[in-house]
Amino acid sequence: MSAARGATLRALLAAGLFGATAPACKPLLESTTASQLAGLLYLGAAVVAGPLAFGAAAATGASVLPRGADTWRRLGGMVVAGGVAGPLLLLAALARTDASSVSLLLNLELAATAVLGAAFFREHLGRRGWLGVAGVVAASAVLSGGAGLPGLSAGLLAAGACLAWGLDNQLAAGLDRLPPLAIAFWKGLVAGATNLGAGLLLAPLAAPPQDVAFALLVGGLGYGASIALLVSAMHEIGATRAGALFASAPFFGAALGFAWLGETPGWPHLVSAPLLAVSAGLVLGARHEHPHRHDAVEHVHRHRHDDAHHHHAHPGLDPATEHTHWHRHEPIEHAHAHAADLHHRHEH
């Protein structure tokens, strides 16, 4: 198997594991509260991400410990928005409607991330991107409205969760002084302990041991192993291709809801699913080109030297080889087609 094919499969497996979290959580809500379940999910993610983060740090020399005021602010915002508010709202939505619908509604996270980026983080979305956002919102409205009042309330809750995760994504996008697995570990540890602690204060844990173990497993696979697989795939085929493959996660979740939970697809699913797929593709494919300037910056991330942004010397290293280390960018001005990634968060 070629390296690219293996990375593609890892990205799809990451999408499948993440997509499976919604249908897997649906039956667990019968024995746990939303706060308790959210805590167990994120603690499970920390258990998986922690050893991987420290192992990667030992190999690359990157630090797992948050350093600097901006890092702490961003990580704190991610814990509150993505680690506490997001899962609680999502689980509340799951309690009101079927898991397949909630899974498809998670496409709103992509739209929320894009809109927040354009509104508050100086990202360019463009006509194609805005058309995709409108399509995601319209399809989500059809999906929610077709289920009556419970569906509408679940849709609003899912939209709130996706808005929280969209903010989480934007904060993470600028967090370039901490590796992704370290972010997942700290977010999982702090958010998991916070959610579980609050849940135990409000109600005793009535779940049997097998449900607790299953919740930890779901979090470990859906939030922990999924991130590790996605990061690994990005190292091989790049963030754009891996991210596009990972966008299939909501559709994996919907399929599992139908196949495993026995949910029946209705006309809202049949109408919204194709529109969601096309609209998500429009958002993911948004690009623009203009002259722009990169100021000097020092950070750590996975990169290669044939992308016109990394000019530091590595004697004997193939420019197309992916690698990670702390490095410095000198100021540069140039023009090329680009999306809103780590190196392109600028005025337009």
Image (cartoon, helix red, strand yellow):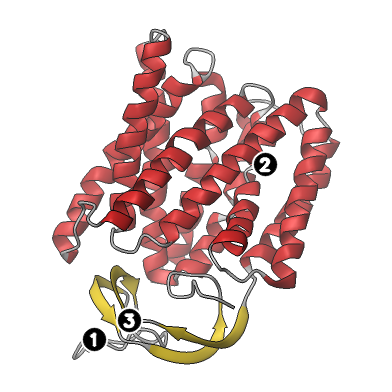
How far is the residue under mark 3 from the one under mark 1? Answer: 23 Å
Answer with left or right where residue 108 lies relative to residue 4.
Answer: right
| Label 3, residues with CA under 10 Å away: few <14, some 14-19, many ≥20 | few
Q: How far across and how far down the image is residue 24, in percent?
A: 52, 29
> Crowding near pointer 2: few (<14 within 10 Å), some, many (20+)?
many
Residue 18 position within the rendered picture, expressed as x and y whole percent measured from the top left: 49, 43
The amino acid type found where label 2 is placed reads Leu
SS label for mark 1: loop
Q: Quarter of the image for the C terminus: give it.
A: bottom right
Question: For the point 72% across and 28% down, which residue is it?
Answer: 153
Q: Secondary structure at mark 2?
A: helix
| Residue found at x 38% / y 34% | 42
Q: Amino acid at mark 3?
A: Ala
Q: Which mark is residue 296?
A: 3
Q: Which mark is residue 317?
A: 1
Q: Residue 313 is drawn in which quadrant?
A: bottom left
Distance Cα–Cα, label 2 vs label 3: 39 Å
Which quadrant holds the N terminus?
Answer: bottom left
Instruction: Identify the residue at horizontal 73%, vertical 70% (top origin).
Output: 128
Residue tagged by mark 2?
Answer: 105
Residue 69 horizontal/vertical position (percent): 28, 55
Sooner in the amino-acid sequence: mark 1 or mark 2: 2
94 w.r.t. 136: above or below: above
Q: Secondary structure at mark 3?
A: loop
Toward the viewer: 221 or 65? 65
Q: Residue at x 56, y 60 (%)?
A: 120
